[in-house]
C-alpha cells in the first residue's frame, strides 16, 4: 500500500509556466491569461468552440495551459465539445469560484482538482461516484499503482481519475560531479551520502544544493524513514515521531553545513536560477526544472549533463520515494443525460495518447506507464526513466480535508530547527501540539 502526503497548490503554482515538447519551448505555460469574462472569477477561454460536436460541456481548472486538453479533445470529437473555464488566481483561491458555482447550482460538468482538494469537494456533495465507470476503462491497470487509490477516492468512494502528475526529485550537474570526484551515473541515494556529496561539490564559487524547502521535499524523505503526517484515521498529526524528528534533523544538518542555500529563505525561482547558472550543483524540484533547463540552458540536456535522482532515503535498506502531486479529474452532479456521457468521454480521453501528449507538452507527467513510451519521453529516455521510477515508487498526499491547514502550520514552524536555534524534537512537538489542538 503506498504511503500518503503533501502536494500543495502553493508549491505547484510556482511551476505553472512550463514548457517542453519536441524542442519547441515556451517561456510560460499554456495559454495566455484571459480576462474574467463571466464576472465570477473565471475566464472563459472558448477552448473547443470550433468543434462540430452537438453537446458542449464545461471543464474548470486552475491553469491556463489546461485549456489545451479541451482544444485537442474538441478537435478530435465528432459528438462533443469542451469549453474551458480557468480561474487565473493561484494557490487556494483557484477553486473558490468553482465552489461558488456549485453552491449556485451552476457547476461545470468536469473539474480538474488538485489531489488535496478531492476530500473538500466530496464533502460538498458535489461529485459523482465514478467508480464503476473508471473500473471498466481498458487502461485502468496501466495507471501507476500509487495513483490508483490515493488520487481517486475519499471515504471508500471513487470520485476521480488522475491525469497530470508532478513529482519531487533532485536534478544535478554531471560535470560538477565529475570535477568533485563523484560518479555522475550514481548520484547519492542515502542521507549520509547526500551530505557528503554536498561537501565535495561546494567550492568558493558554488554551493552543493539550492532548495526552496517545503513538504514537496521534506515529506518524501520522512516517508522513506517510516514517518507519517497523520494518524491512520486522520484525526491527529503524528509527524513528531522519532522518524519525523530524524528527518528534520537531516535537513537541519544540510542547512547548517554551509553546503546549501538557506532552506528557510531561498525562493523557488532563485534556486533554479542558481542551478542553471552553475552556482549550485543540485536543485530540488519537480517537472519545472526540466522545462526551465530546456528553455534557458538547452545544451545541458543536449550534452547529457543533466542528471535526475530520487530524493535520498535514510539508508540503503529504505525505499526512496517521491511526492506525487498534480491533478485528478472529476465529474460533478451537474452532468446529466448527454452531458454526462460527454463528461465521461472527456475524462477517458485525458489518459489516451493524445491526452497524455498534452500533459507532456506542458511539462508534467502522465498517469499511465505507457505515457513514457511517447516520443517526448523517449527523446530523453535517460532522464524520463528517473521520473518513471519516481511514479512507480512515489507517494500521494493524504486525502484529508484538513491537509492544507496542517501543511501550512507545519512548514511555517520548522525554521528554528533548520537554523539550529531549537532541537527538531522540541520544534515538532510544539507544532504538532498546536495542530492537534487548533486545526484537527
Image (cartoon, grey):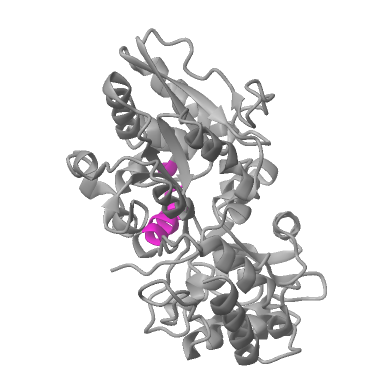
Q: Is residue 189 visible?
A: no
Instruction: Count the marks.
Output: 0
* Above or below, comparing residue 243 to residue 32 in the picture: below
Residue that appears at 51% across and 20% down: 47
* Above or below, comparing residue 20 to residue 324 in the picture: above
Q: Nearer the viewer, residue 341 or 25?
A: 341
Segment colored magenta: 377-391
Q: Nearer the viewer, residue 422 or 402?
A: 402
Q: Is residue 379 located in the magenta-colored stretch of the structure?
A: yes
Could you tell me residue 146's position as x and y percent? 33, 60
Q: Residue furthest front?
A: 104
Left or right position of 253 against 348: right
Q: Nearer the viewer, residue 195 or 127?
A: 127
Could you tell me residue 353's position as x and y percent? 33, 33
Could you tell me residue 136's position as x and y percent? 17, 40
Can you say which quadrant of the picture contains the N terminus? bottom left
Q: Residue furthest right?
A: 204
Residue that appears at 27% across and 22% down: 337
Residue that appears at 48% across and 12% down: 49
Q: Is residue 347 located in the magenta-colored stretch of the structure?
A: no
Task: Kindly report the secondary structure that dominates the magenta region of the rendered protein.
Answer: helix
* Above or below, comparing residue 306 to residue 439 in the picture: above
Could you tell me residue 231's position as x and y percent? 41, 77
Left or right position of 367 against 136: right
Q: Nearer the viewer, residue 64 or 158?
A: 158
Q: Is residue 343 visible?
A: yes
Left or right position of 225 against 79: right
Amino acid at each position: 500500500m503506498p504511503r500518503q502526503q503533501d502536494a500543495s497548490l502553493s508549491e505547484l503554482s510556482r511551476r505553472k509556466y512550463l514548457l517542453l515538447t519536441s524542442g519547441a519551448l515556451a517561456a510560460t505555460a499554456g495559454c495566455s491569461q484571459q480576462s474574467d469574462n463571466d464576472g465570477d472569477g473565471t475566464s472563459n477561454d472558448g477552448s473547443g468552440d470550433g468543434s462540430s460536436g452537438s453537446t458542449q460541456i464545461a471543464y474548470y481548472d486552475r491553469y491556463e495551459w489546461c485549456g489545451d486538453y479541451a482544444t485537442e479533445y474538441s478537435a478530435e470529437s465528432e459528438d462533443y465539445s469542451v469549453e474551458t473555464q480557468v480561474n487565473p488566481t493561484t494557490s487556494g483561491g483557484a477553486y473558490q469560484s468553482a465552489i461558488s458555482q456549485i453552491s449556485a447550482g451552476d457547476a461545470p460538468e468536469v473539474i480538474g482538482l488538485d489531489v488535496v482538494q478531492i476530500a473538500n469537494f466530496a464533502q460538498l456533495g458535489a461529485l459523482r461516484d465514478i467508480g464503476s465507470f473508471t473500473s471498466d476503462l481498458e487502461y485502468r491497470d496501466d495507471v501507476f499503482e500509487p495513483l490508483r487509490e490515493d488520487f481517486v477516492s475519499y471515504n471508500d468512494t471513487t470520485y476521480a481519475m488522475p491525469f497530470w502528475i508532478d513529482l519531487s526529485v533532485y536534478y544535478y550537474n554531471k560535470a560538477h560531479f565529475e570535477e568533485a570526484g563523484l560518479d555522475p551515473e550514481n548520484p547519492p541515494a542515502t542521507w549520509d551520502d547526500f551530505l557528503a556529496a554536498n561537501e565535495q561539490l561546494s567550492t568558493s564559487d558554488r554551493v552543493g544544493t539550492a532548495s526552496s524547502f517545503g513538504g514537496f521535499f521534506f515529506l518524501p524523505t520522512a516517508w522513506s524513514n517510516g514517518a507519517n503526517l497523520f494518524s491512520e484515521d486522520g484525526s491527529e498529526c503524528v509527524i513528531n515521531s522519532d522518524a519525523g524528528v530524524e528527518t528534520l534533523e537531516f535537513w537541519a544538518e544540510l542547512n547548517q553545513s554551509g553546503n546549501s542555500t538557506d532552506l528557510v529563505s531561498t525562493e523557488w525561482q532563485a534556486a533554479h536560477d542558481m542551478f542553471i547558472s552553475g552556482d549550485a550543483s543540485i536543485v530540488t524540484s519537480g517537472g519545472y526544472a526540466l522545462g526551465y533547463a530546456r528553455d534557458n540552458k538547452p545544451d545541458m540536456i543536449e550534452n547529457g549533463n543533466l542528471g535526475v535522482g530520487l530524493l535520498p532515503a535514510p539508508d540503503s535498506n529504505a525505499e526512496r520515494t517521491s511526492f506525487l502531486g498534480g491533478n485528478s479529474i472529476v465529474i460533478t452532479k451537474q452532468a446529466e443525460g448527454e452531458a454526462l456521457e460527454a463528461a465521461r468521454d472527456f475524462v477517458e480521453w485525458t489518459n489516451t495518447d493524445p491526452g497524455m501528449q498534452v500533459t507532456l507538452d506542458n511539462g508534467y507527467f502522465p498517469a499511465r506507464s505507457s505515457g513514457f513510451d511517447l516520443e517526448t519521453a523517449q527523446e530523453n529516455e535517460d532522464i524520463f526513466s528517473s521520473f518513471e521510477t519516481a511514479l512507480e515508487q512515489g507517494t500521494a498526499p493524504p486525502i484529508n480535508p484538513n491537509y492544507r491547514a496542517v501543511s501550512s502550520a507545519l512548514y511555517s514552524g520548522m525554521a528554528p530547527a533548520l537554523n539550529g536555534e531549537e532541537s527538531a524534537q522540541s520544534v515538532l512537538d510544539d507544532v504538532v501540539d498546536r495542530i492537534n489542538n487548533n486545526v484537527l
